[in-house]
Amino acid sequence: MTNTTKRVLISGAGLAGPAMAHWLLRDGHDVTVVERAPAIRDGGQAVDFRGEAHMTMLERMGILDEVRRRRTEGGPLVIIDAEGTEQLRLPASFTGGAVEIARGDLSHLLHDLTKDRAEYLFGDSVAAMSETAGGVDVAFDSGARRGFDLVIGADGLHSNVRGLTFGAESRFLKRSGYHAALFDAPNHLGLSGRSLMYSEPGRGCLVYPAERDQDTLTVMCVFAADAVDYHRRDVAAQKRLLAEAYAGAGWELPTLLSHLDDTGAFYFDAIGQIHMDRYTSGRVALIGDAGYGATMGGMGAGMSLIASYVLAGELAAAGGDHTVAFPRYEEQIRGYAKACQRVADGAGGFFAPRNVRRRNRVYKILSSGLLVGLLDRMTTKAANSIRLKDYAV
């Protein structure tokens, strides 16, 4: 138990926010989580955990067994040509790690872990913040005003807390020149037990059966585009942009994209990374994607859970004194965040390479014979690039 109980506001109820709430509650703090969405989000791409650090984290949280129980049945990733002919096959561990779980399932698991002890405010968001000598005055979109001792930004790549505290997103967002979209379509391929990936120069597509409905495919499209003009909440415009980017594409892409207007959940964003000199300012701290995220490939789930553990642990070790804990948190997490981001650097080029044959040659070599072990080590090196302290939380 810390020396002083803190009133902590966490912005974001995805993965990092509820994980942070879990550790703070265990240390006796009063926790409020605010989330713009009306409820915990379902769906989304599956997330994976790999390496000793990730597995240790899940075990210390007490959720490893439950994550394993809810794990997805990941299969190999088969890369095909325009005729659907297999070109190479990557092992399930390459995309699914040691254990893979649907993002929505993990979100619900973390929420269930904390909902009876933390206050959750859905359908609301932070509108303004002002720091005083004794805390942070927060105004919400709903019109409510409240005071907190600390504010934690766990609200993703487009973090509202980061914008209010550190300035415009454009100062920190490094674009990759690629965009990604995620949507559902009927499983007209009869796909089961594996994922398929088809690539053309500058655009690619990954499909796999939805975890809860084998009659549905999850479709992820990645394409090269330096600058695309759209509003983040204008879904209709985003769908038009996606259709235009894949005009004339081969394989089954015309059929898959024909279901864009019928799909329920739809995600579209530029692939990018957040790079910041600092993750804390005064009584505000950023964790996970809000401070050092990558749109894909940066092991965001594992990084978010580890970051929440480190920040809460340093607060506990400092008796709740953020002036001591925040610098220690930054020192602990910076190298780890950079290592994960380096892995994510090649995500766009993997799915939508400029030279498809070259990509295939490289991964055919890496996935063959004795080099399979090297491929696994490559994917776990960044995940293990932190030594977790055993905090008394």
Image: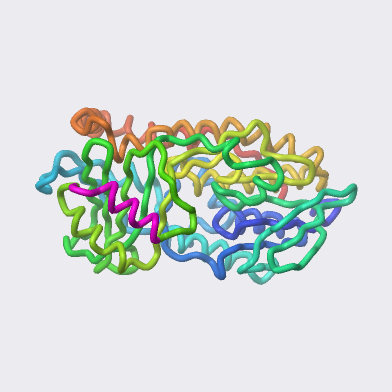
Residue ID at (67%, 38%): 279
Image coords of residue 223 (percent x, y):
32, 42
* 279 up-or-down from 75: above or below: above
Looking at the image, can residue 26 be seen?
Answer: no
How is this picture coloured?
A: rainbow
Q: Pick the residue in front: 297 or 70.
A: 297
In the displayed structure image, the side of residue 64 where residue 354 appears, left or right: left
Residue farthest to the right?
133
In the displayed structure image, the side of residue 382 where residue 113 appears, left or right: right
Q: Which residues are magenta?
A: 236-248
Q: Pick the residue in front: 244 or 126.
A: 244
Image coords of residue 48 (percent x, y):
42, 49
Q: Most prominent secondary structure in the magenta stretch?
A: helix
* 124 up-or-down from 78: above or below: below
In the displayed structure image, the side of residue 326 where residue 189 appears, left or right: left
Quadrant housing the N terminus: bottom right
In the displayed structure image, the side of residue 87 where residue 235 appears, left or right: right
- 243 within the magenta span: yes
Residue ID at (61%, 39%): 388
Q: Pick the residue in front: 53 or 194.
A: 194
Image coords of residue 234 (percent x, y):
45, 59
- 78 within the magenta span: no
Q: Pick the residue in front: 230 or 250.
A: 230
* Total number of numbered discs in the rendering: 0
Looking at the image, can residue 73 be seen?
Answer: yes
* 286 up-or-down from 104: above or below: above
Dividing the picture into quarters, in which one does residue 91 lie?
top left
Residue ID at (17%, 54%): 252
Dividing the picture into quarters, in which one does residue 73 lie?
bottom left
